[in-house]
Image (cartoon, grey):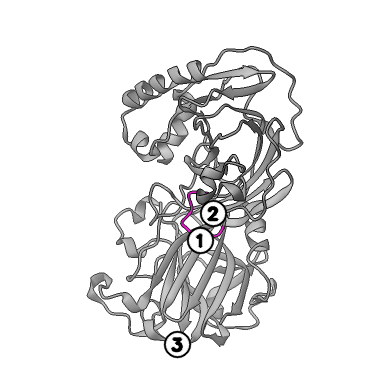
Amino acid sequence: MRRWLGLVGALLLGVAPVLQAQELQVPEGFRPLLNAKDTTGWHGMPHFDPRKLAAMSEEERAAQIDEWNKGVAEHWSIVDGAVVNDGHGPYLTTDESFTDFELLIDYKTVAKADSGIYLKNTPQVQIWDSTEEGKFKLGADKGSGGLWNNSAGAPGKDPAVLADKPFGEWNSFRILQVGARTSVWLNGQLVVDHAIMENYWDRAAPLFPNGQIQLQTHGGEISWRNIFIREIGSDEANDILRQHAGDGFTSLFNGENLDGWDGANANYEVAEGAIRCKAGHGGVLYTKNKYGDFQACLQFKLPEGGNNGLAIRYPGQGDPAYSAMCELQVLDSEHPKYAKLDARQYHGSAYGMIPAHRGFLRPTGEWNFQVVTVKGSTLNVELNGNVILSGDLATVTEYMANKEHPGKDNADGYFGFAGHGDAVMFRNVEIKGIE
């Protein structure tokens, strides 16, 4: 997936007739995705599983895109600086792919139109005719801006308020996406608040790590203008995720020393305001207090090939992979030396028991943000805004190497870090009990 997305700009080109253009007023910190003169930087692509396109050869993929681009020329045009679709043809799709970003976009549509914005090639931020009674049963009466393809009852599926303007007026979206966490403002009103956008193409997997933005066509004329994007770096993304993690946390690390920690203190050090496992050393550094059901949030940074772990309900002795409820892997999963591991050994996995989804770590050397929720026998791991593991250890019956985990039923225990000789760093370590 990532390899194809990196090739998109070199392979694809959209073309549309120019009727009239206007000078863009670009907000500070943003850059335009539409130049108000033509569709340079865009290509055609209908509702199509991007994994199938990525699986094609370069020649097959280029031929498929060329075919879709014929529909761009036929059904899309530039009018008064806006790109206009007649309600038919392929969706206008960015050549570029994006990971974490803030998107600004205006649209204007007509009665009975039904459209939307695909994020990371996934449907969609919904656009309705909120007055069309025939679609009230689908949620049209609630207005535009919801993540309509989320599961029934899921957060974000319906907008919090009806914020659509009357037909003939321009509507303005602001969309903020960090991982799968998606917030949507329509005409200045928050309609989706930091909700997980589900992966329409595979409900069992997280949203794709990155992907393209698509403007959907769905039977009614729609115009788009003032399309601007601001890509979000890891530090800002981590701040956004922490702000939404909520209150009630207690800091486990004062940024200066290892007060409040027991175990392998001599094998860890404080560096750059973070706890760092000393290179060539290891062992378990764990809290003085025990925890039952809890939520922890922290940031970590991996060196090349780095390996560590989070000890969950650790009893204070033994190998946390087995004596604790589990060891949640902290690992540079994509390093070549780990290419042949068991799926239950990669980052975020409950070691030897439940595998986590891969592909959501930031580049080595950048800080990652992770939230771990432990309740009863269940675990939830959210990495950089993506849920990579959600499982119940009580249901595990098959173990890696047929080696059972006697600690998996621990009702409480210490929280800690399980070092394996690499200089993995942790900071902003916080925890709170939950009921």
Q: Categorize mark 3 by other alpha carbons within 10 Å: few (<14), some (14-19), many (20+).
A: some
> Residue under circle 2?
157
Mark 2 to mark 1: distance in Å?
A: 7 Å
The magenta stretch spans which residues? 148-155
Q: Amino acid at mark 2?
A: Lys
Q: Nearer the viewer, residue 2 or 42?
A: 42
Residue carrying label 1: 153
Identify the residue at the far left of this view.
402
Three-letter residue code for mark 3: Ala
Residue 35: name its quadrant.
top right
Classify 81 as above or below 271: above
Residue 219 lies, in percent from the top left, at 50, 30
Dot 1 lies on which element?
Answer: loop
Tell me which amino acid carries mark 1: Gly
Instruction: Tell me the residue at 51%/62% (across/down).
Output: 382
Task: Please state if 310 lies on the left or on the right of 181 as rendered.
Answer: left
**The N terminus sits in image quarter:** top left
| Rendered residue at 35%/79% (across/down) | 394
